[in-house]
Amino acid sequence: MRGQFYVIGVGPGDPELMTLKAARLLDQCPVWFAPKAHQEGESTALAILAGAVATAGKEILELHFPMKKVRMGLPPDPEVEAAWRLAAEAIRAKLDQGLDVAFPTLGDPAIYSTGFYVCDTLLKYAPQALISVVPGVSSIGASAAAVGQPLCLGDDRLVVIPATFENGRLRETLAQFDTVVLMKVHRVMDKVVSLLSELDLLDKAVLVERSSHAQERVRRDLAVAAREELHYFSTVIVRK
């Protein structure tokens, strides 16, 4: 009998925001494959779940996934594709041994997660693989909670986009939607602030760094924040 592969959202940072189902399945799975952004670094997802689930007795393997852009409709960077392939091969080997495997991922797996790329690659090698996806609390929801405001009410329209991928249509997006959530803003904050100022929306925007972490910061003066080095886990919410 083959094992089952679980892609599990562990939330944005606070271990107490992990779901009961996530904790149960992680405790149940004997093998964890934990993603990390840097070869010599540590897995943030693993650090989060370790605050809620015992790691003793688990086979824990950390997988490096390069931090490079993936554009839908275009071939992925060869280094990124190779990382997906190596992960899928390693996971398949454990599944073939009859072991259940967990792949913890930050926030919710459905939102900009490496987990789905790994799933797609795994299915190329093992079309019959049993895969389950477990949702988690997203950084988007956690950021709104930190600010103490809703993302949308009534007939509000909400859009979520990665600021680093923006193709010049941000002005149009800000005009069309009631709430715009900009993710991955840390490298383009100066451009975001400039446009928001031009559109007279700077006072409608708030920056949240490391939502739900102990080091969480809510910043309302984005012009000041733009002159500082921001953490990778930074989100801007513009609510008109």
Image (cartoon, rainbow, N blue to C red):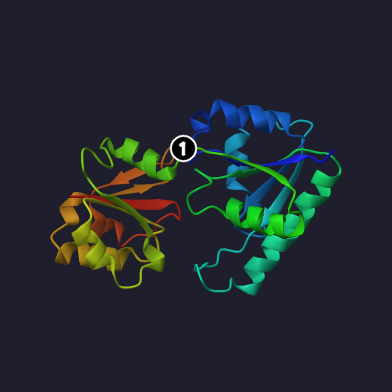
Rendered image quadrant of residue 176? bottom left
Q: Residue 216 location in percent, x, y?
A: 40, 41
Number of numbered discs visible in the structure rendering: 1
Residue 148 visible here = yes
Up the image or down, 218 lies above or below 122; here it is: above
Residue 41 visible here = no
Residue found at the very far front of the displayed protein: 128
Instruction: Describe residue 224's horizontal placement relative to residue 116 as left or right.
Output: left
Please give the residue where the numbered disc 1 appears in the rendered image: 137
Identify which residue is drawn at 71% across, 33% down.
Answer: 55
Q: Residue 171 location in percent, x, y?
A: 23, 67
Camera-side residue of 34 and 220: 34
Identify which residue is drawn at 34% across, 60% down.
Answer: 228
Instruction: Describe residue 101's horizontal placement relative to residue 48 as left or right.
Output: right
Q: What residue type is labelled 1?
A: Val
Camera-side residue of 33 and 135: 135
Identify which residue is drawn at 25% across, 37% down.
Answer: 149
Q: Residue 230 location in percent, x, y?
A: 39, 57
Instruction: Describe residue 221's horizontal placement relative to residue 64 as left or right.
Output: left
How would you rate the neighbour count of disc 1 (Cα within 10 Å): few for under 14, some for 14-19, many for 20 or more? many
Q: Residue 185 location in percent, x, y?
A: 37, 60
Rendered image quadrant of residue 123? bottom right
Q: If the image is split into quadrants, where does the N terminus sit?
A: top right
Up the image or down, 67 lies above or below 141; here it is: below
Secondary-structure class at tag 1: loop
